[in-house]
Image (cartoon, rainbow, N blue to C red):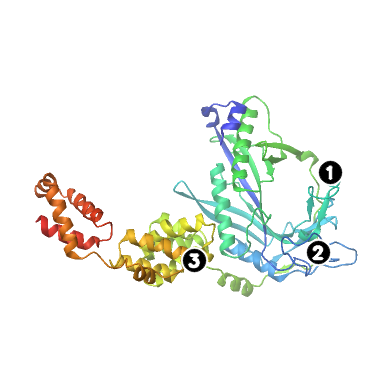
Amino acid sequence: MTKSASEETGLAPEILAKYEPVIGLEVHVQLLTNTKIFCGCSTRFGDPPNTNTCPVCLGLPGTLPVLNKRAVEMAMRASLAINCTVHERSRFARKNYFYPDLPKGYQISQYELPLATGGWVEVEHDGAKKRIGITRLHLEEDAAKNLHEGFAHSADKAYIDYNRCGTPLSEIVSEPDMRTPEEAYAYLTTLRQILLYTGVSDCNMEEGSLRCDANVSVRLRGAKEFGTKVEVKNLNSFRFLQKALEYEIERHIGVIESGGRIFQETRLWHQNENRTVGMRSKEKAHDYRYFPEPDLLPVHVSSAWRDEVLRSLPELPEAKRTRFVSQYGITPYDAEVLTATRALANYFEEVVKAGASGKNSANWMQTELLRRLKDSSKEIDASPVSPTALAELVKLVESGKITGAVGKKVFATMFDSGRSAAEIVAAEGLGAQVADFTIETAAREVIEKNPDNVAKFKSGNEGVFKFFVGQVMKSTRGQANPQAVNDILRKLLS
Ligand SMILES: [Zn+2]
């Protein structure tokens, strides 16, 4: 991915290696409330433009904001899940700027007294764990949305949809703790997973529920001082975040290596051109003239309320992964796959609760279930095979009533028809295990045809045994009980 930029800058890998990138992210996340932060209008996405508005969110004179308690609670959930201190007292402030998407002429945000500060998330990348610090989490209202396409006069006019205006947001600002684009990617992935687990946001990037800006600079390895940072906006997908950072890092190194200097500025990622473009320099940056919002009281969070929210948090992904490994004896990799979402983790635990072993449940889910769900573009919640139905199948295989190969065929039928494993096995006669004498006949035949291997086995080559098992399974078309095949072969070969 770094190719396009290095082709452009022509930087050798040893030049790039001299520098260390420093990355911090600012993430805006839309809180999953039914109504807006300062009025009772709906926050539903996709309604006809300007249907969810009222005098408050349209900023008409004489209206007063009323804080949505649910929005504060959601922001508290997020804060506590990322190990922040939720302050007893925080305050809203006016951030003044003039833009058509902001009808009041100011945005109500938090400034010098944010809701929460000083947290961290643990990120795993390339097998190494690292803590990324969280500077702050604050509450604010979203602006409206400018629409530049799809209307009668779009060629020479911009349209504005005020439905989004006043939607509650949390801005989560990280410390400049990331050192590679991959680490930034891992941080955003981890943060998104926590926000989804706690039900704070749907984190839908296409609908704008999760938006990301990056602060990036470079410095010579070993240097203490940070380089001049640039803010990159418009990173509305994980892939764009990584590509924009890769591009920007090489651009910085290129400028410094050729004797130039980096100016503090805001740049936009242009996805079609695969590059960032300067938007405005900091010298021309807005002076937001923040001052305390006179129409709202300071936010007061009692320790009782904070504790109540803390108790209501679900088990978080990291804790779940650790528990899955120790409780079910599955690998860390399996635990990571199975805790990708809460729904998936719950499904797994229900399969185990219904009597299947942790290890086999994990295997069947990953090899058969997830593959088929993906092929049919279904989420785990819409799986045609329920956890108890999958457990029944896994137990049939575990008990040797059917073989693994037959189990896979049964699973395919279960997935397509919704019928139970026992039903399919009975109806198709799959459960009828191959009789012992049939296995014995097949085994004798294999032994007769392979005197060389018999000799090898008798002289102590245990590895050859697998060959015999394989041949017998083949001639019984995978339907013999592997344990019976093993026992009969041992008897005949001894
Ligand atoms: Zn409203």
Q: Identify the residue shown where x is 66% and y is 72%.
A: 302
The image position of residue 335, as x and y in percent, is 43, 59
- How far apart are the two marked residues, 1 and 3, measured between alpha carbons? 48 Å
Pick whichever of labels 2 and 1 is earlier in the sequence.
2
Q: Nearer the viewer, residue 160 or 303?
A: 160
Tell me, yes or no, if residue 329 can be seen here: no
According to the picture, the residue beneath numbered tag 3 turns out to be 384
User: Mark 2: which secondary structure?
Assistant: loop
**Is ligand 1 within 8 Å of the beta carbon of the residue shown at mark 3?**
no
Q: Residues within 10 Å of mark 1 (few under 14, many from 20)?
A: few
Residue at the far right in the pictured view: 61
Kind of residue at disc 3: Pro
Closer mark to the observer between disc 2 and disc 1: 1
Tell me, yes or no, if residue 448 can be seen here: yes
**Is ligand 1 within 8 Å of the beta carbon of the residue shown at mark 2?**
no
Closer mark to the observer between disc 1 and disc 3: 3
Q: Residues within 10 Å of mark 3 (few under 14, many from 20)?
A: some
Kind of residue at disc 2: Thr
- How far apart are the two marked residues, 2 and 1, measured between alpha carbons? 24 Å
According to the picture, the residue beneath numbered tag 2 turns out to be 51
Q: Nearer the viewer, residue 42 or 327?
A: 42
**Quadrant (top left, top right, bottom left, bottom right) of the C terminus:** bottom left
According to the picture, the residue beneath numbered tag 1 turns out to be 155
Residue at the far front in the pictured view: 428
Which numbered tag is attached to residue 265? none
Q: Residues within 10 Å of mark 2 (few under 14, many from 20)?
A: few
Q: Identify the residue shown where x is 87% and y is 67%.
A: 63
Pick whichever of labels 2 and 3 is earlier in the sequence.
2
